[in-house]
Image (cartoon, rainbow, N blue to C red):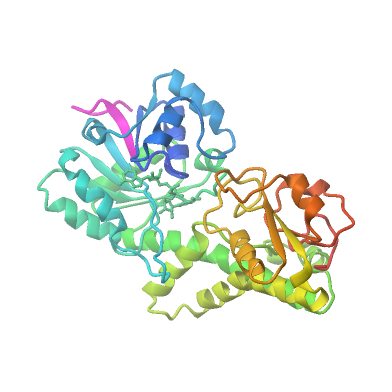
Amino acid sequence: MEPRGHFDHDIVVVGGCGHVGLPLGLAFADCGLGVQLYDTDAKTVDLVNAGSMPFVEAGAPDVLRRVLAAGRLRATTDAATIARSEHVVVVVGTPVDRYLSPDVEAVARVITPLTDHLVDGHLIVLRSTVYPGVTDRVARLIAKLGLDIDVSFCPERIAEGHALAELRTLPQIISGTTRRAIQRADALFRRLTPETVELEPEEAELAKLFTNSWRYLKFAVANQLYMIANDNGLDYERIRHAVTFHYPRAADLPGAGLTAGPCLLKDTMQITAFAENRFTLGHAAVMVNEGIPLYVLGKLEQRFDVTALTVGILGMAFKAESDDARSSLSYKMKRVLTGRAARVLCTDPYVCGDPDIVPFDTVVEESDLLIIAAPHREYASLRTTKPVVDITNLLGNGVMV
Ligand SMILES: NC(=O)c1ccc[n+]([C@@H]2O[C@H](COP(=O)([O-])OP(=O)(O)OC[C@H]3O[C@@H](n4cnc5c(N)ncnc54)[C@H](O)[C@@H]3O)[C@@H](O)[C@H]2O)c1
């Protein structure tokens, strides 16, 4: 694929140094396309151009070095690069607000100041997870410019940390507001993967939200079953093993844990808003998953005088082997404990920039009790005589404490 006509680059990724934008840009560059990463975060842009990954992503450091050396990828804070790139992939954050309501203007707010850089021949690909109807809204905004521009929505479905492998294996959902937009988006994503599935934009917007809420609901089922087993002194993992062992109909029953991160809760809440608060299963899942830190505290208070204890939290990231602490329930755990325990200590081998994080050995030495919050594999070799709360069963100890 050569950039068409007046374009110098195949792709510009708006939000290109983020958790989704950067791996996507790397994947496209690694299959031969010329990629520009446009991002407003100058520090991260410099880091990427210097060959350093700003976050943990399997296999990414090698690919970054390779595509930089080949001259196929460059990060920039200069929006002028958009006019020189044929495909404009927009993958900025779309968080819910503090009342957990979706922000339907989030994507348009990013695109509006960039309209001076939009030109005939562009294909705009929305890649962020968006509220249903946002693609059509953006298409109406673009139509007002009177330019010959196609608009498509192709949601990202990777799991953070596994993006580069998954971008080459997961089928891509393709939608667009015109037939030409769909065909162009399909041709672009077929550079990454042979399988695509076509939907209408609103179907595709819901398909992405359903994907994440399905996962969130499954974790809620696991967490509730865990609490039922644990309340009765039974080992959830032993039961789960029996339930799933060579039994395909239940094979995807997950383990219990702190279900968190930047996507699952907020996308469940986007469906809740879309369904006018009638997504009762979604609401129930939020209550269960967000309730786990309080459940743990309640159990501890039944067995210990928590006010006299130093409690150590192992793992502040939202999941194992990740450095991403966004929306991590480890911080909710810390907050509820801070009000009750004598002292709370935190550690994490990956998370950077939190001044409260102290070395692992300090936490293990100075704590009376430990909680494995993010089950990083480093903690599997933990040897201690102190009580350990291990919901994820990393240590294989059975019931909670
Ligand atoms: N994180 C995931 O695992 C994941 C998976 C699938 C989908 N998503 C969706 O992808 C989207 C992006 O999520 P993320 O985790 O990559 O977010 P992120 O915060 O890691 O990345 C967003 C990037 O956009 C940049 N940015 C912000 N405003 C900008 C602007 N006006 N112009 C240019 N750049 C700008 C930021 O500096 C940042 O680098 C969200 O809609 C999210 O729901 C995320």
Residue at 54% across, 57% down: 261
- Up-down relation of residue 378 to residue 287 (above or below): above
* Location of residue 25 in the rendering, given as x and y in whole percent from the top left corner: 42, 35
Where's residue 234, x and y in %? 84, 73
Does 24 appear above or below 268? Answer: above
Image side of residue 369 versus residue 356, left or right? right
Describe residue 223's horizontal placement relative to residue 177 as left or right: right
Residue 255 seen in this snapshot: no
Residue drawn at the location 43% of the way across and 74% of the way down = 272
Q: Magenta residues, as a range?
A: 1-13
| Image quadrant occupied by the C terminus | bottom right
Q: Residue 81 colored magenta?
A: no
Q: With 180 as the anchor, is 314 left or right in this view?
A: right
Question: Closest to the observer: 2 or 86?
Answer: 86
* Quadrant containing the N terminus in the rendered view: top left
> Which image quadrant is residue 57 in?
top right
Single out the residue that lies furthest toward the right: 385
Extreme-left residue of the structure:
146
- Residue 268: x and y in percent read 48, 68
Q: Nearer the viewer, residue 306 or 156?
A: 306
Q: Residue at x 45, y 33 (%)?
A: 26
Count of numbered circles on the image: 0
Residue in view at x 71 percent, y 62 percent: 343
Is residue 1 or residue 387 the one in the foreground? Answer: 387
Residue 300 location (% of width, % of height):
77, 72
Q: Determine the image quadrant of residue 72.
A: top left
- Asked whether the viewer can see residue 80, the reply is yes
Q: Main secondary structure of the magenta part?
A: loop
